[in-house]
Image (spheres, rainbow, N blue to C red):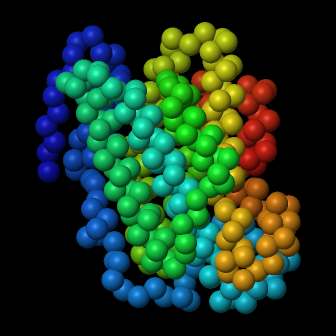
Amino acid sequence: MTATVPEARADQPAERKDTAERLLRSSAELSFDPTTQVDWETPLDRTKHGMSPEWSSLYGTAYWDELTEEQRTELTRHEAASVASTGIWFEMILQQMMLRDFYAKDPTDPSFQWALTEIADECRHSIMFARGSAKLGAPAYVPKRSTVELGRLFKSTASGEAAYASILVAEEVLDVMQRDWMRDERVVPFVRTVSNIHVVEESRHMKFAREETREHLKRAGRARRQLNAFYVSAAAYFIVSSMWNEQVYENVGLDRARALREAKANEHHKAMLRSSCAGLMEFLSSCGLLTKPALYFYRRANLI
């Protein structure tokens, strides 16, 4: 399939135009329809995990060692659903930020058309995650009310590099996790398919977010850069800390207080999160967005 993209206006930055055109072509050539390309009909295999066990918040703890294999698989299924629910929450924020950014701009610009393409992708991803959570037998793991309200404020005020760098944070962390899940035969097959779809399509979204972050920062002075570095790091903390909902442990029959205590002290899980963000931190540093105040939140989220 060959995509036809309109010619960008001459006054658009050449690199930005080229990136958008490439992404539009890639989307036309390789995109998925989760309604038909994910196996929603086969009954859930309860002997399989919902995520690679190493990504469980309790993996490597004394509590994990005490769990039966049945308890471990149930826990990872609920944890995968919790991560997916957080993904839906932030994808809705992402869509609103992009719509605000491109509101009333030139529709002949390939970047404008790519933004709408990405929003369409995110709508499909959210439905896919929602169906996946239901198939895993988990409830909706909505972030804490305080986090939801902070997200409401963030989506209404974040713009420019703050919006796009925050989008990148959420996508990069999930991307690394799902690359493990989609290759892991211990993971239930439909989750592997969902992960593969998301990884392929989000790779284009991350490319665009990086380019937009750089483009917006060309006009940023030191004060603005410092402020938005802090803004992005705070968003990163609330996104990542929401991925493993506290209610998960109680819902699978574990001692909630003990599980929370051991998960909080789990050095293996912290190391997994840090490894997932190595490339992201390098990018933020190269953009001048890894400031001392920002490091406070990244450390609290175990991202650095």
Residue 177 seen from this side: no
Q: State the residue at coordinates (35%, 78%).
A: 40
Q: Indicate the position of residue 165 as horizontal and vertical percent values.
A: 55, 33
Residue 216 seen from this side: yes
The quadrant in which residue 11 appears is: top left
Q: How many marks?
A: 0
Q: Indicate the position of residue 77 as horizontal and vertical percent values.
A: 58, 76
Q: Is residue 48 left or right of residue 294?
A: left
Q: State the residue at coordinates (62%, 55%).
A: 143
Q: Where is 174 relative to 42, above or below? A: above
Q: Is residue 292 left or right of residue 89?
A: right
Q: Is residue 177 left or right of residue 160?
A: right
Q: Indicate the position of residue 289 as horizontal and vertical percent values.
A: 65, 26
Q: State the residue at coordinates (51%, 31%).
A: 156
Q: Is residue 233 left or right of residue 116?
A: right
Q: Where is 37 relative to 157, above or below? A: below
> Considering depth in this image, is 26 or 232 the residue closer to the camera?
232
The quadrant in which residue 81 appears is: bottom right
Q: Indicate the position of residue 297 as horizontal and vertical percent values.
A: 75, 38
Q: Quadrant of the C terminus?
A: top right
